[in-house]
Image (cartoon, helix red, strand yellow):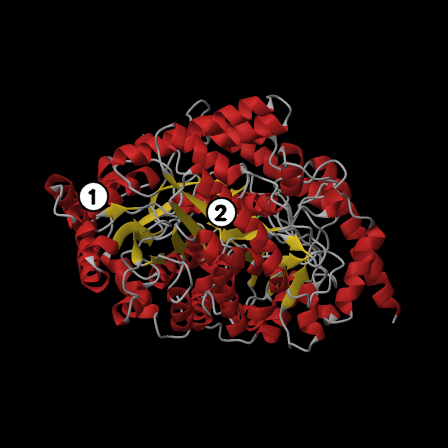
Amino acid sequence: MASHIVGYPRMGPKRELKFALESFWDGKSSAEDLQKVAVDLRASIWKQMASAGIKYIPSNTFSYYDQVLDATATLGAVPQRYGWTGGEIGFDTYFSMARGNATVPAMEMTKWFDTNYHFIVPELGPDVNFTYSSHKAVEEYKEAKALGVDTIPVLVGPVTYLLLSKPAKGVEKSFNLLSLLPKVLAVYKDVIADLKAAGASWIQFDEPTLVLDLESHKLQAFTDAYAELAPALSGLNVLIATYFADVPAEAYKVLTSLNGVTAYGFDLVRGTKTLDLIKGGFPSGKYLFAGVVDGRNIWANDLASSLATLQGLEGVVGKDKLVVSTSSSLLHTAVDLVNETKLDDEIKSWLAFAAQKIVEVNALAKALSGNKDEAFFSANAAAQASRKSSPRVTNEAVQKAAAALKGSDHRRATNVSARLDAQQKKLNLPILPTTTIGSFPQTVELRRVRREFKANKISEEEYVKSIKEEIHKVVQLQEELDIDVLVHGEPERNDMVEYFGEQLSGFAFTVNGWVQSYGSRCVKPPIIYGDVSRPKPMTVFWSSVAQSFTKRPMKGMLTGPVTILNWSFVRNDQPRSETTYQIALAIKDEVEDLEKAGITVIQIDEAALREGLPLRKSEQADYLDWAVHSFRITNVGVQDTTQIHTHMCYSNFNDIIHSIINMDADVITIENSRSDEKLLSVFREGVKYGAGIGPGVYDIHSPRIPPTEEIADRINKMLAVLEKNILWVNPDCGLKTRKYTEVKPALTNMVAAAKLIRNELAKY
Ligand code: GLN
Ligand code: ZN
């Protein structure tokens, strides 16, 4: 019985690749140094899989930045502005596309399906001259072979590549990207020939777009593409890997009828409906790569249950055609549990990171072939049982309270316009009130103070004193700038989710549980393992301190339940909605404590609400329903005069605008400046919006200081579609990553622009 891994994290167990990349980019090390680190990482991954007993070991899943960018390099689809003149693409051109250079900005990046991984979006037009320009796939194959490991080279499938592309600048939006298929396939044929010549006997095409709701002409492209490739592929075993959801019935039919394909990979963790499709009919003589080990979570597999699933499939596809696999690439999970020195043994026994998942896959394959490692299986069963019964996981009071919320409605009693009137009487704000999103620059000094406090190098007293001073400085600055609604600057927070997770029960934290987000950037999501509750107030002390420094309204600053959920590794033993309801109740208590402490404006950030949207349309309404409900629960208990803000940092809201309105916040601040005012077009098209709204007036992701006139111009554009009495003026997002030398002049201009327009409005 065979085993397979869809893909593996590249960063290394201690983020070795990150540090090598950044040092190279800073000019502190050479290209050879970087290559050396990469060679070592690849070798250790291949050897690890080989010694675990994995049969189909992937290659070309390593990347210096991103696998889609690697495909762009392979195809030679370099946008003209990077000045590439042909030949093998080197680091210069490659990293310029990824990160920009002194003169040319980077290519756009966007989220890889519903993960937190971001890929570089190919920009294609009718005149791209596709040529085979990076031999990375075949080089990696040979490199592994030289180490004695015969791998299965992985390529981003040609149709997925095109479906994820966008028309290049200047090319009409309506340009049919799929019209490029023949040209793209010509290069794929070269790559395939190369791999064959090097001795490859298998090849894997990742075609995850097959799990989306595709129109029939897009499905047809798969049929056409693989028919065209079939002669080139003859003699090879060809695996089409899908992942992240079930494959719709229509797509399943297309997929399993593809020419020249011998194996299909399915995500059986997120795609339980696919299981029914397989049982309903699977082409005879073909391989099924059954993804039963979750590539997107950190939980140990329930081996007994997976084994039962696999045994059920054996009867359908035949014993020798069933391959045990991961549900997706392991890129989306943490690397190795071995490096977790701070987690206790009980929690550790419940977990499996990438390195442990390899062992699970192999154990399942062995068990299927009659070589069950009884000790391994019974240790796993014991861990599953302990997780089920542990008092650390279950808190009955919380379970009950959360269960009671389902199916009920939670809405503030008074409608938003009446609330805004009541709030205005209390707050007495000018028209076009100014505010910021929360964080102020996190200086080196500030990070040092937090680090030293955590390491017990400074006393709590010293720590509190430093943070108070910082808050005081930030408050004074905002008063000098004449901002209307102030923030405390979030100096005590390392991260907007971790900060709350650390104070809530039911959360655990890793030391090395990093997951690649984009390029060298990694995130370390908290692990939600148990019922969530709030032992004591989390932000009231700091918000009260901040309010005591000023007579102006001070915003209390919280992270919302949906964002906490979406940016954590979540429980797989209960629905996500249930976990979110629990977090909502904890945040609700915090909101009410802030109100009691005299905080009259409270912002509950839901930065990640949009990104949790399920891939398949049929599942979106349900998600939006409980997500929005959870948000409303957090603030349903406050008085009319308490103003609830929320913030979102994605501009791609047009499709969920009604859900955003349904959140019923008093004020929403929202990203807008990077999106050519896409957001405003919704209002232009007549969506009725009566709550307060602050579409960001400048981009905080760039060091550029926006001139007053430019901001004034933006405000005027907003006034063309939104009532003046609901409009707020604020930046796009928090100022955490900026320098004071940028923040001060930018906010000065922002306030000046608001005043300018107030004066103009006063004339009429
Ligand atoms: N309040 C947070 C901050 O200002 C919001 C960050 C975010 O939206 N990502 O940093
Ligand atoms: Zn934001």
Could you tell me residue 448's position as x and y percent? 53, 27
The 10 Å Cα crowd at callout 1, few under 14, some 14 to 19, many 20 or more, is many
In this rendering, the count of numbered labels is: 2
User: In this rendering, is residue 86 above or below 252?
Assistant: above
Could you tell me residue 247's position as x and y percent? 39, 65
Residue 733 is at least partly visible in this image: yes
- Residue drawn at x 55%, y 38% is 135
Which residue of the protein is positioned furthest toward the right in this rendering? Answer: 763
- Residue in front for this viewpoint, 396 or 131: 131
Q: Which residue is mark 1?
A: 363
The amino acid beneath tag 1 is: Ala
- Residue 192's label in the rendered image is 2
Comes first in the chain, label 1 or label 2: 2
Q: CA distance from mark 1 to mark 2?
A: 32 Å
User: In this rendering, is residue 137 above or below 758?
Assistant: above
Could you tell me residue 667's position as x and y percent? 61, 64
Q: Left of 99 or right of it: where is 656?
A: left
- Judged from the image, the secondary structure of the residue bearing numbered disc 1 is helix
- Residue 689's label in the rendered image is none
- Residue drawn at x 15%, y 48% is 369
Q: Left of 238 or right of it: where is 53?
A: left
- Residue drawn at x 46%, y 24% is 458
Residue depth check, mark 1 versus mark 2: number of the one nearer the observer: 2
The amino acid beneath tag 2 is: Ile
The 10 Å Cα crowd at callout 2, few under 14, some 14 to 19, many 20 or more, is many
Q: Quadrant of residue 311?
A: bottom left
- Residue in front for this viewpoint, 410 or 75: 75
Disc 2 within 8 angstroms of ligand 1 (CB): no
